[in-house]
Amino acid sequence: MASFLSVLFVLHALAFLAAYPLLVASQEVEDEKEFDYRKGSVKGPEHWGELHKEWSNCSRGRMQSPIDLLNERVVVLPHLGRLRRTYMPAKGTIKNRGHDIMLKWESGAGAMYINGTEFFLRQLHWHSPSEHTINGRRYDLELHMVHQTEDNQTAVVGILYKIGRQDTFLQQLSDEIKKVIDKKEAEMEAGILDPRGVKIGSRKYYRYLGSLTTPPCTEGVIWTISKKVRTVSREQVKLLKDAVHDNYEANARPVQPANRRPIYFYTPRFNAYVPHV
């Protein structure tokens, strides 16, 4: 059964990725004046798809992100294999993009591998509260590690956080983040940073095919969400919120319909059930 399901996943992925090169030219929009997260706003998430023709996926797409990772719908698929990552220290820059805080690496930060394809780590950023939910529960923070191939296919690793002990990697960046508070488009060199400092904490993960969670909501993104919910301090979440231009209360897109998409779950040891989170 596991082998059969593995074949299904590959066929499903190939069917969508075959059309993906037509879409990847659309990257995340970085100008926060173009859209916002305010409920009821004419530039809010419910209207993103109406603001520009090239953003139509935001309202018409059938493979949008984020989604609720509902255990009742998950298929256990051990043949997905462990996450293979070859990260390494590289020069990083902190940027206030207006709608979020981003840490970017121009090059040399390493890569992850999916089905033998090399996806290079380009940047990471945070959303508060979390964009993805697990069994309907929304967490306090979500980190996205954005990877791309040489031909711009995209894969994102998502890590969810709840309030608790501070996150050591985010703590390393606190001084630089403070320097770009409320300074739209401001950038600050952050020195040599090792992405291995971002702790995932579990070999278990969810995987599905979705989209960017900001305009233009490009589809064909391979999502990997760690099962482990890590901790972040209340002060660290506040710092990220304070740093964002216009003091958004949230910068998380609402959950989107799954539209019968398969959601897979990797665990090193096969079980007939998916453990509760």
Image: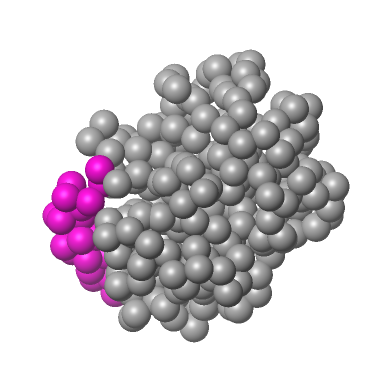
Magenta-drawn segment: 1-25
Say above or below: 114 vs 196. below
The prevailing secondary structure element of the residues shown in magenta is: helix
Residue 262 image-quadrant placement: bottom left
Whether residue 2 appears in magenta in the rendering, the answer is yes
Task: Name the spot of residue 135 as percent of width and height, x first.
Answer: 59, 78
Which residue is rendered at x = 41% and y = 55% of the image? 215
Q: Decide whether residue 218 is among the magenta residues.
A: no
- Residue 52, image x, y percentages: 33, 59
Nearest to the observer: residue 19 or residue 239: 239
The residue located at (72%, 51%) in the rendering is 247
Quarter of the rendering occupied by the N terminus: bottom left
User: Left or right: where does residue 13 sit relative to residue 85?
Assistant: left
Q: Is residue 225 left or right of residue 199?
A: left
Residue that appears at 29% across and 46% down: 26
Quadrant of the image occupied by residue 258: bottom left
Question: Looking at the image, can residue 227 be seen?
Answer: no
| Quadrant, the C terminus | bottom right
Residue drawn at (47%, 42%), measured in percent from left and top? 30
